[in-house]
Image (cartoon, helix red, strand yellow):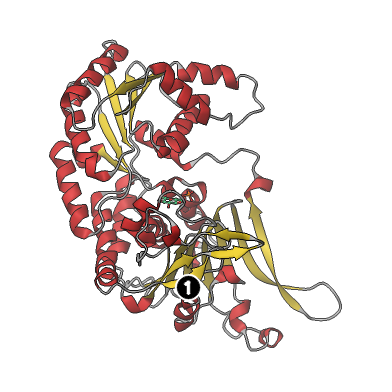
Amino acid sequence: DKESSVSITVVGASGDLAKKKIFPALFALYYEDCLPKHFTIFGYARSKMTDAELRNMVSKTLTCRIDKRENCSDKMEQFLQRCFYHSGQYDSEENFAELDRKLKQHEAGRSSNRLFYLSIPPNIFINVVKSASLSASSSSGWTRVIVEKPFGRDSESSAALTRSLKQYLTEDQIFRIDHYLGKELVENLSVLRFSNLVFEPLWSRQYIRNVQLIFSEDFGTEGRGGYFDNYGIIRDIMQNHLLQILALFAMETPVSLDAEDIRNEKVKVLRSMRPLQLENVVVGQYKSHTKGGVTYPGYIDDKTVPSDSVTPTFAAAALFIDNARWDGVPFLMKAGKALHNKRAEIRVQFRHVPGNLYKRSFGTDLDRATNELVIRVQPDEAIYLKINNKVPGLGMRLDRSNLNLHYAARYSKEIPDAYERLLLDAIEGERRLFIRSDELDAAWDLFTPLLKELEEKKIAPELYPYGSRGPVGAHYLAAKYNVRWGDLG
Ligand code: BG6
């Protein structure tokens, strides 16, 4: 309804995520005229700040994405005038009641919808939800709460967190964010598969030899060691971002594009998977490395990390889906920090053409000549398919070439940040890209036994130099399943 108002309260407004992602995403939505007519943005945090100071802080992080348009700075000023600040404790019902009074003034008697974005550590989620829900019960529209990972550290703590959230909120008020689901190429995955005849029938064990999900960053935990050491790369990237991509990739055809239909299929895939075993996992940790006269610090050189930490900053794993479609197909994951490049991609390696007439042209290594579909999620978004092709000329020589859909060349429109899409969806009540509690449970059930074993046995990670391609153990793991990592050529 056009006349109702929406308020968006960013709890933890002075934090990194708020500054880097949430406020800029809200501005981009405003800029694109995607926010409702009557909207107000509130920052909430402990530090004392005036509205003007918040605006000043936010303005520093805003950029004009489409900077060619001249009215950007006017728009920015208009946007900032809709931003306000309230300082309060995270566990104070009184402070949230004050916020409630301010929100009411802005709502001016209209039907009021309220979105709270909890950009705060999970150990204070509950306080905030409790305090906020008491005031929210006085609003006449919907109340929704966006929460960020970590959603616990294992099955038990995650279930406990869910239980306490549900004392104050219903499942459909909780929007668990996994920002990888908001990435353009991850959204496109279903389109690519379900709307192309050249892919859809091939999407099974019959034609696909293995699937690889690769995440790498070319920087370490810089400044986040304290958080990171409690979680490690498996919880930080694999159990959520990569597993979510896997579920979307491998699910059965949903009944419709409706959120519940899609999430029903995702949860089925997750529940068909074998819990991870130690023998199918390799862990690594980066060590300091000097290159070109520059010394890059090792993980334990971070002052906030204990010097005997065995927390993995790299992991590779082989996962299996025990259902009719994927029986026996290895899904290999690899995630690491302080590697040689920054990249997130999905690689699908296909089987051989049976009785290939050109077998002789490939020598003994037929595997190198099979088709491979690469979906490069970031950077420089692209989808390309490796095919065999005759090198032009009188002879018969084959090589591998790419059929290439390079986004920057094909589409002139800028790709929105994941947070823009997800915030817009939350405002519109679209739940498709948020994690339902049964999905979260299934995801933890897959990883919890492994995480416990790693921690109980204090498994020492294989050290790899900062800026390298990661531990060699990852190659052996892949080789065990006859797989070669596609990103290493
Ligand atoms: C976050 C992790 O969820 O994702 C970070 O906590 C990681 O460790 C980040 O750097 C990567 O996100 P993106 O969008 O920059 O690839």
Residue at 31%, 62% in the rendered image: 270
Left or right: residue 426 compared with residue 375: left
Counting from the top left corner in percent of width and height, residue 307 is at: 37, 63
Q: How many marks?
A: 1
Choose top left, top right, bottom left or bottom right for residue 388: bottom right
Left or right: residue 175 compared with residue 297: left
Query: Does residue 305 show up?
Result: yes
Nearest to the observer: residue 2 or residue 297: 297
Left or right: residue 347 compared with residue 88: right
Residue type at tag 1: Asn
Q: Is residue 419 above or below residue 474?
A: above
Q: Is residue 428 above or below residue 50?
A: below
Residue at 35%, 21% in the rendered image: 85
Counting from the top left corner in percent of width and height, residue 76 is at: 53, 21
Query: Does residue 251 show up?
Result: no
Nearest to the observer: residue 159 or residue 432: 159
- For mark 1, what is the residue? 210
Q: Is residue 455 above or below residue 133?
A: below
Label 1 environment density (alpha carbons within 10 Å; few <14, some 14–19, many ≥20): many
SS for dot 1: strand
Counting from the top left corner in percent of width and height, residue 472 is at: 50, 77
Counting from the top left corner in percent of width and height, residue 212 is at: 48, 67
